[in-house]
Each structure stands twice: as structure tokens, then as C-alpha cells.
Amino acid sequence: MTVIDISPSVMQFLLAFIVVAPLLGALAALLPAPPGLRGRNPDQAVLRHGVTVTGAVLVAAIVLAAGFDHDQPATMQATTDISWIPALDVRIHLGIDGISLPLLVLTALLTFLCALYSYFKLPAGPSPKAFVALVLVLESGTLATFAVLDLLLFFLAFEMVLIPMYFLIARWGGDQRQAAAWKFILYTLLGSVVMLLGLLLIGLKSGTFDMVALATDNGRGLTTSVQVIAVLAIGLGLAVKTPMWPLHSWLPDAHTAAPTVGSVLLAGVLLKMGTYGFVRILLPVAPDGMRTFAPYLAAFAVVGIVYGSLACLALARTGAKGDFKRLIAYSSVGHMGFVLLGIATMTPTGVNGALFANIAHGLITGLLFFLVGAVKDRYGTADLDTLAGATGAALYGRAPRLGALLAFAAVASLGLPGLAGFWGEMLTLFGAYSPAEGLSRPAFRTFMAIGAFGTLLTAAYMLIVVRRVCMGEHAPHSRLSPDEQPQQAPRAADGPQPAGTAGSPSSGTAGPRTATTPQLADIHPYEAAAWTPLVALTVVAGLWPAVLLGLTDPAVQQLLAGGKS
């Protein structure tokens, strides 16, 4: 069943366009804008160019999803297979199935929303041309990662995103951006070197780099020792990108220093590349090796769940001077722990839960980073003690729509039933209750219990943050000094200035501005446009999970069966 009937050749073109168009758009962004398209200034023209290109890619991704045959989600569709390097049997092999399609659409959506947000709220830094070009290169590399079906092409696409993200952090980031950018690039590059050796080992020992052929063979052409070495090498590189505890330490620094859109793309898109590699490559290609390491992977995953939650609780406590962005970054360590636990079960239930949690995390944490960025813009700080103190947010009273949306994202992140965050965690825990044959049930049920405890810790720190930031501390009323006054949202220099300033009727705030309750600009129209799709999809995925599970389940069943449905 397809929503619209599209010919195979058009489907091939759409997938190729989705992968290549951002790269061509990045090159065009660096060229001078034609006189008729410059608008008020060249900077505005290049920002509009970024919105146009990412919007076209999103439309193509939606049309591709509409033309996808939902009756056969386990079959590779929109495939292109062209010989590229005959001597190594490397092919330009593209295709999508029920596993990769949701990630492709999520990437296109988040990148478009970031481009739209940046049109009105460009982060401070060098040339807008470079910013737009880097975002488009990042999008192209991420989309290619989810679309290619050749091991070496997968590696090239996997590495393609590192340089743009490095420069987005190093040139457009905040405090400590250089150190955070170097830490990001060093961790990921070192992991990638080891991963390349593992990919080459699989390709040379099996005689092909084709991921479809390798998945169909299901490891029968590889000895157990080769599979174990390959899983260790490839898994290390993928674990760094995921990030898995204890290889996660680059993530909080990168998120804290990155601009808002950089954090959204890093959490919503880049982290998914690592877990996708586990599902697409290691589970079907080296099942014996995965079975050997699955208990260790699960153990690291549940440690990450608890560690991330405890780190968030430490940052959320009064007097800790915790950074709000850093707290959300540590929450990602815990959430991605659930994804890794689901993969480690090697069961359809667990892997489907991991894929669902992947998408849910991209939607919810992407929204959280947008919201934290907005709070930081209004106050000039993301320090939780400042936000919650006498000079702090009390967002329910001063920017009620922003406060309500922050509370919504927080309860979605803690896994409230009826929202997207619930299903992935629940299915992951169900998968751990009954892992694949050959895995220790007592061990995995212990991991399940620890993971369930982690959900309680997640609820604890999220509710503490909502109480402190949205409701404020019970501090005595006192007149604020000039240094304690919150900063108003700065004007957006590169796009139309939205209506609604601090204390105005259109800002959504109530009551006159006083010394103890300074009013804030509430949600601007451009913010609402960027955030509404994420809110809507979080609700839809929570209330109607069959839409996503109907895509992933047949593909996962076939993948785990070695290509046999």
C-alpha cells in the first residue's frame, strides 16, 4: 500500500536528490547571490537559500515516504546500484526500508526546522554563508549514512558529518567552544579509525562490502573469531558516536558549547548514526559476535542510564550551578542507554523499541534544546540556580506559553504514557525480560530492573527542573539590582522581527512589569513555527505508535532472520 503511486525510477531520483541536493546547496551557498535574490542584504539571501534547500529536501523526503510501499517495509526500495570502484567492488548502492525511512524523514525535518529558526535567530559568529554551507554538508552526510548500502560508503558518510559539526561548535559556539570542539573531533576520529579496520575486515573476509548481501548471508561466511573482532572494532566506533558510557564524556561539553541549532542536530540526528550502525551492520552481519558482546553492551547501557540520571540530579540540585544545556546532554546519555539495551537483547521487541526510542529522542530532545536555547536567549544564562532564583524564570508567570511547552517536553522526555517517549522505553524493557536465545535471562532481567529504576530517576530530575525553572524558588521578594535583571530576547538581525516584546500585550505575558517580576517575551511566531511540528509528532507517535512500528517491525524481523522473512 502506498499513499501515492510513484514509479520506481522517480523513487530512485527522489532518494538520490535527498542525498545530493544539500551538498549542491552547500556549494551554491558559497557563491555570490544573484542580484534579484539578495533581498535586503546578502546575509539574508544566503539564510533564505538554506531554508529553501532544506525545505526542498524535506518535501522530497515526505513524497518519498508517501510513495513507499508500506505493505513491504522489509524490502529495499528506491534502490540505485552503480559500480564505483570495481577493483574493490565498491558500489554506489542506495536504498531505504522501514528501518531507515523514519530516520531519513526525521533528519530532513530537523534540519529544515533548524534552518528556519536560524533565518530569524542566527547564532553569533563568522559569515552566514559558511554557517549555511556547513549545515547543508552536515545534512547531506547524515542522510547519506541512512541511505547507503555499501560499507565503505557508509564509513565515508559517517565521517562526512564530523568536520561541519566541529566548525559549528568551534566558530558559532559559546564559552569553552574550542576545547569542546577538539574533544568532539578527537573522540569521534579515534573511534572511526578502529571502525574502519573492522569494516575492512568484514569486506575482505566475506568478499563483498554490500550490506544487503552481507545481511542476507547473516554471518555464515565469517568465522566466529572474525565476527568477534569485527564487532569489537566497529562497535567501538559506533559506541563513541552513540554515545555509550564510558565513551560519552565529549557529549556534555559539545552540547554546552554548541549553538542552539548545533545542539538540536547533534542530539536529534548525529547520535542516531551510531545506533543505526549497530542495527544495520552488526546485528545482521555478525550475529555470533554480537551475541558474545551483547551482555557487556547491555551492562554498559544500563550503567549509562543510571549514570546519566544521577548526573542530571546532581546538576538539578540547588546550589550546584548546573547548566541547563549540560543537564539535557546528560539526559541523552541515559536515553541512548535504553536504545543500546534494546539492541543488546537481539530480539524483535527490543530492537523495535530501540528504533522507536531513537525517533522519540530526536523529536523530544530536539525540542528541549530549542526551548533551553530560547530560555538562555531571554536570560543570557542557562545556569539553573540563576533561572530558579529570585532573578529567575518562574516561566509560568512571566512567559506562560514557553513555560508550558518546557513542561510538556520534560514530561515527554520522562516517558509519560501517551507521548512518544513511553513506547521505546517500554518495548526495550520487555525485550530485556526475554532476550534472544543464547543470552542469559537472569542477567538481562537484572538489566531490565536497573533500567526501570533509571526511568524513576529520569522522572525525578525532570520534575525537579520543571518545578525550579517554571515555578521558581520560594525566595523573599526583593528589589533587583540592574545586574540581576533578565535579558530580553535580542532582535533578529537577519530576518523579520517577530511581534511580541517584553511586557507587550502580544508577548503572551500577564500583568504589569514590576521590579520583582520582570516580564519576558513569550513564544515568537518563528519559534512556534519551528517547534510545533515536534510537539505534534511527539503526540502522534505516542497515541498512534503503530504508524512507526508497522514500518520497523517487518524490517527488523527479516534483518534478525538473515534476510529470510
Image: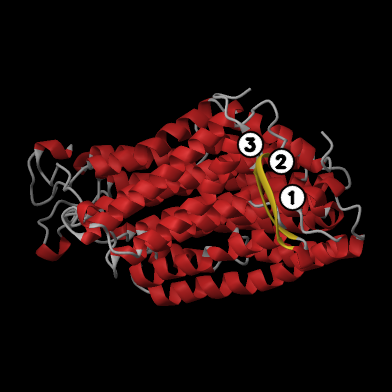
Q: Amino acid at mark 2?
A: Gly
Q: Quadrant of the N terminus?
A: top right
Q: Quadrant of residue 488?
A: bottom left
Residue 475 pos. (x, y %): 22, 52
Q: Amino acid at mark 3?
A: Met
Q: Label 1, on which residue?
A: 344
Please, is residue 280 above or below residue 380 in the view? Answer: above
Q: Earlier in the sequence, mark 2 or mark 1?
A: 1
Q: Earlier in the sequence, mark 3 or mark 1?
A: 1
Alpha-carbon neighbours of circle 1 within 10 Å: few (<14), some, or many (≥20)? Answer: many
Is residue 495 found left or right of 113 in the rendered image? Answer: left
Alpha-carbon neighbours of circle 3 within 10 Å: few (<14), some, or many (≥20)? Answer: many
What's the distance in space between the residues labelled 2 and 1, CA to CA? 8 Å
Q: Label 2, on which residue?
A: 350
Q: Amino acid at mark 1?
A: Ala
Is residue 34 found left or right of 350 in the rendered image? Answer: left
For label 2, the SS is helix
Residue 459 pos. (x, y %): 49, 43
Q: Nearer the viewer, mark 3 or mark 2?
A: 2
Q: Nearer the viewer, mark 3 or mark 1?
A: 1
- Picture residue at 62% right of the left edge, 49% below the top: 147
Q: Earlier in the sequence, mark 3 or mark 2?
A: 2
Please, is residue 320 above or below residue 175 in the view? Answer: above
Is residue 139 found left or right of 235 in the rendered image? Answer: left
For label 1, the SS is helix
User: Which sits in the foreground, 289 or 474?
Assistant: 289
Q: Quadrant of the C terminus?
A: top right
Q: Mark on residue 426?
A: 3
Can residue 503 be seen in the rendering of this structure? yes
Q: Mark on residue 412?
A: none
